[in-house]
């Protein structure tokens, strides 16, 4: 999946209509992008009871500043930047308040999935989210963008305003930290004992 950006850009005419304040265009833009926004917030900020509030914060920022969108980059890149800022702010808030205690919610289950497969998938998803939330935000961001969202190293560098070499360094460290923590989570599951990784 890495290297294949999953985000689809809305048509230019829709963006132009939004810039003019067309309420119908706002609604259409929301419908076309909300799944991507929800997914990236879930992956970056982790499961939240107030996920809809985070989504709302993103769209308040989008519609409040869409007139400033110049089209120098893809709309999805601009929208992702807003999601990133909202997730970063939420991550800092959670760290201060809850010391990053993870509350795991399941991603929607495919309708054709058996209960047994669903339970196993939910356990894996819970473990992945617990491990992701343990990573520092800078590492988590690069890992999610590259491995889960399919952005290229160049796109990530542009979005985060860092050198591409820094992207690859952070990705390397994120993968190592993720692998180490995921292995530890598997040991905890197998033994039932919690010890530091």
Image (cartoon, rainbow, N blue to C red):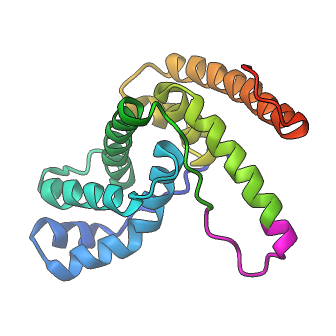
* Near-viewer residue (135 or 74): 135
Magenta part, dominant SS: loop
Query: Residue pushed farthest left?
Result: 20
Query: Residue pushed farthest right?
Result: 190
Is 105 rendered above or below residue 94?
Answer: below
Is 126 rendered above or below residue 174?
Answer: below
Residue 75 seen from this side: yes
Q: Residue at x 31, y 59 (%)?
A: 53
* Percent coordinates x, y for residue 152 in the rendering: 56, 38
Is 152 rendered above or below residue 67?
Answer: above
Q: Residue at x 86, y 32 (%)?
A: 187
Is 165 rendered above or below residue 142?
Answer: above
Among the 4 quarters of the image, the one containing residue 145 = top right
Magenta residue check for 6: no
* Percent coordinates x, y for residue 32 in the rendering: 40, 72
- Horizontally, residue 159 falls left or right of residue 195, namely left
- Horizontally, residue 56 falls left or right of residue 139, namely left
Q: Residue at x 17, y 73 (%)?
A: 17
- Horizontally, residue 132 falls left or right of residue 188, namely left
Among the 4 quarters of the image, the one containing residue 15 = bottom left
* Percent coordinates x, y for residue 4 in the rendering: 61, 49
Q: Quadrant of the C terminus?
A: top right
* Near-viewer residue (160 or 131): 131
Q: Residue at x 26, y 61 (%)?
A: 59
- Horizontally, residue 86 falls left or right of residue 9, namely left
Magenta residue check for 110: yes
Query: Residue pushed farthest front?
Result: 193
Boundaries of the magenta span: 107-118
């Amino acid at each position: 999946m890495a290297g294949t950006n999953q985000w689809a850009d809305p048509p230019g005419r829709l963006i132009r209509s939004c810039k003019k304040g067309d309420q119908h265009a706002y609604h259409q833009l929301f419908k076309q992008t909300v799944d991507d926004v929800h997914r990236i917030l879930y992956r970056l900020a982790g499961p939240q009871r107030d996920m809809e509030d985070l989504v709302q914060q993103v769209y308040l920022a989008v519609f409040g500043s869409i007139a400033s969108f110049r089209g120098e980059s893809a709309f999805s890149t601009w929208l992702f930047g807003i999601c990133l800022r909202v997730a970063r702010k939420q991550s800092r808030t959670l760290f201060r308040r809850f010391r990053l205690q993870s509350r795991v919610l399941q991603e929607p289950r495919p309708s054709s999935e058996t209960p047994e497969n669903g339970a196993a998938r939910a356990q894996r998803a819970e473990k992945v989210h617990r491990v992701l939330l343990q990573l520092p935000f800078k590492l988590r961001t690069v890992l999610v963008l590259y491995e889960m969202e399919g952005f290229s190293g160049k796109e990530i560098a542009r979005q985060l305003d860092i050198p591409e070499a820094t992207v690859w360094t952070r990705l390397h460290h994120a993968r190592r930290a993720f692998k180490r923590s995921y292995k530890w989570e598997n040991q905890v599951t197998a033994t039932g004992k919690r010890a530091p990784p």
